[in-house]
Structures are given as C-alpha cells and as structure tokens.
Image (cartoon, grey):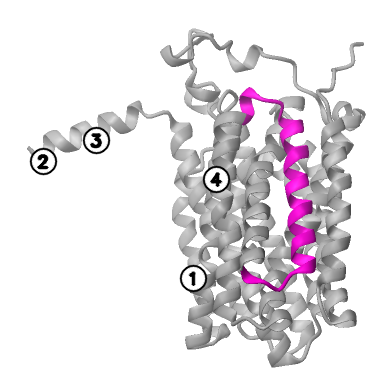
Amino acid sequence: MLNTQLTRIVKWRKQVYLGWWVLVGVMLLQVMVSGIFFQGFGVYVPILIEEFGWSATTISLVVSGRQVLSAIAAPGIGFALDRFGARRVIATGLVTMSIGYVLFSQVQTLWFFVAAQLLLGFAANLSGWLPSNKLLINWFVKRRTMSLAFMGMGMSIGGLLTPFMAKLINAYGWRPIAVGSGAMMFLALLLIPLLRSSPEAYGLEPDGFARADGKVIKPSKLNSIPPPSTVKEDFTVQEAIRTPSFWLIAIGHAIALMAVAAVIVHLITHMSNGIGFSLETAASVFALVTGVQIFGQLFSGFFADRLSKHKIAAVAMLFHAIAMFIFAVTESMPIILLAAVLHGVAWGVRGPLMSALRADYYGRTHFGKIMGFADPIVIMGALIGPVIAGYSFDNFGSYSTAFFILGFTTLIGSVCFALATQPKKARA
C-alpha cells in the first residue's frame, strides 16, 4: 500500500509542470528575503533611534546608501543572471545575507552599522526581486502576470511577520533576532533545488509547452495560444532603451518606490514615535498594508493579462497618492487603517505589473540586462523616499510634509504609466 502511494506521488510530481515548482520556490524565497529584510527593517528603526540616538534622517541615508550600491551593482547582477543563471546568484546572496545579519547583530558604531547594511543590501539584491523576476519571466508567458502576482504574495506574507518580529524584539532584544534572521537566510538555501533557470533545459517551453523533434507541442489547456517562442521578436538592450516606454516605466516605477520605501522604513516610526501608538500596534498596521496586498495581487494575477497593464498601473498610482495624503493629515486609527488598505491594495495591484509590462514589451531573452539598466533609475526612488520622510520627521517633528510631497509626486507617476504604451520594434 505504501509503495503504491509513493508511486502515485512520484507520478503526480512528474506530471506537474516544473514552472509551478519554480514558483513555489520563488514565493518561499520572497517570504524570507522581502519579509525579514526589506519589510522587516522598519521594526528596527525606532529601536535604533532610541538606543544609539541616531536621527531618522541618518538611518534613512544609510538605507539610501544600500539603494545606491544596488543601483551601481544592478547592471552587473543582470549580466550575471543571464550569464550564470539565477541559482548561483541567489545562493551567493543568501550566504552573504547570513553573514551580514551576524555582523548587524554586533553593531556598536554608526560606521559599522553602515557597513553591515551595505553588505545586506547588496546580498538582498542578489537573492531578491530581480533574480526572482528573471526566473518567472523565463518559465511563464501566458500566465506571466499571475506568476509574478503569486511571487508578490510571498512578499506580502513575509510582511505579515513584522508584528511577530516586534514581539520577539520586545521579548529578547534586537540583536538575537538579527542573528536568528541570518540563520533563516542560511536555511533558505534549501530552496535552491527548486529554482531551475529555464524551461528549455528540460525540453520545455514557457507555460508547459513541450518540445519534440524540434517542434513545439501545445498542452491541451493552451490549444488556442501560439507557442511563446513565436509570439514576437525580443528587443535587445540597445533597442529597448531607445523607446520612450522604457523610460516612462522606469520613472513611474521609481516614483512608486518613493512612496513604498518611505512607508517600509518609516510607517512604524510614524505610528510609534510620531503619533504615540505602541511598537506592536504600529507593526500590526504595517502588517495590514502587506496583508491586503494579497487582494491586489490576486486581481493582477487573474485579470491584468486580459486588460491594459499600463492603465491599471496608472490607476494604482492614484490609490498610492490618496493613501499618502491620508497619512499626512490624520492621527485617527480608523482613517489610518483606510490609508493602509488603499496603499496595500495599490502596491499589490501595481507590483506584478512592473516586470510583466517590461517582459510583454521587450521579451524575455534579454530581460535580466534590460532590468539591470532600468534598476539604477528605479532604485533612485527607493533612495529618495526614505530620506524625504526622515528629514521631515527630524526637522518638522512629523512625517506630514513628506507624505504630502510623496502624494503629489505619485500623481506624476500615474501620468508616466498612462503614457507608457506598447513600443514597436524598429526595422532595419
């Protein structure tokens, strides 16, 4: 009986498209990297301010320094992804993150903190958003936005860890939790076998198409869809950067990250040090932001491939803007919760579209390099947003000025996405 069950499990596993296993691996990876590092960092900010007396601006500049390093390294990471494959790049990043968290736990001076955060930021880029996107772009075309949305759900689930992290830090202190985070990153290496770089290496095409005798065989559920390799000719990097949409998407994405990064780094401090709620309550509001992302991601996953992605992104930016304005003017918990929901849903809807738009417009062959060239622009938003927020808090006693600025800027980002239409490949 047991042998029969094992045989059925093995047979079922072989019948499942390998891309779904890649998606599972990517989702779990994002729970770890995005949840613990990117979204979990905000829990540390009020504690670091209290323990070391550093200003919010100082900590924001350190976070921005991580982004500058990421911008410098992005083209190289994109090249490494196309040249060596995502597995090696991600594994290198996870090991480096483990070391970085151990170093972070030993921080006593500002300069040591800077060094540890720069190392963590670089490692997170090796094992985070860009390589995960590259993997899913390779494995999915018809279901591309859906796969990216489920990856985003991994990020959202990771964000739900923030109240748990706040409880642990309150109970045991932030240094042991930093060491524990490093151990978790090392354990994430167990996911590497799932992260296969491309379907072609396994006799497949994206979305489950199979190869036989040099021909593409369509799976029964996709009979009405042309084989992905014949859809269109992919853009090179040089061709992509000559199109207005490359720059409009990059600028719109950068502006979106101004608001997103400011909320990630400072919302908990805004709620605790600024308005006066407890650390755990503030972390719970941030968890709401990440939790409701799931609803936006489900919308993107199931409907965005049938609708105009750039127009959906433009509308999502309007929701970001409304949330920023609400954060700027209220201290009422019910209204703050409304802003958290609006921001989270907008983030969830827009997030998967950032890569899906580029892949739809420019193809998957040179996706890593194209994203590598866009990243320096995109990362500037994540660099500027937290600094604006930190400066506002240090010099005006609240984050209201920063949230107003970010709200108006986000409206400009909405226009960028509205104008980012499908580019046409130039013919010789």
Between the C-alphas of marks 1 and 2, the distance is 35 Å
What amino acid type is highlighted by mark number 2? Answer: Leu
In the rendered structure, find residue 87 and report the number of the disc placed on it. Answer: none
Asked if residue 331 lies in the magenta stretch, the reply is yes
Mark 3 and mark 4 lie on one chain; the one further toward the N terminus is 3
* Residue in front for this viewpoint, 13 or 157: 157
Report the residue marked by disc 1.
183
Q: Considering the numbered disc 1 on the image, is that residue within a helix, a strand or a loop?
A: helix
Who's the residue at 69% across and 28% down the image? 364
247 sits left or right of 8 in the view: right
Q: Secondary structure at mark 4?
A: helix
Is the C-beta separation of discs 2 and 3 under 8 Å?
no
- CA separation in Å, label 2 and label 3: 11 Å
Work out whether mark 2 precedes mark 3 in sequence or the reverse, and give the earlier one: 2
> Crowding at label 1, few (<14), some or many (≥20) Cα neighbours within 10 Å?
some
Residue 400 placed where, x, y %? Answer: 83, 70
Element carrying mark 2: helix
The span from disc 4 to disc 1 (Cα, nearest Å) is: 31 Å
Residue at image location 85% in from the left, 67% down from the top: 402
**Residue contact at pointers 4 and 1, CB within 8 angstroms:** no
Residue under the image location 78 percent in, 58 percent down:
259
**Label 1 is placed on what type of residue?**
Ala
The span shown in magenta is 304-333
Q: Which residue is the site of mark 4?
A: 295
Density class for disc 3 (Cα within 10 Å; few <14, some 14-19, many ≥20) is: few
Classify mark 2: residues with Cα within 10 Å, few (<14), some (14-19) or many (20+).
Answer: few
Q: Which residue is mark 3?
A: 9
Q: Which mark is residue 2?
A: 2
Q: Is residue 8 left or right of residue 238?
A: left
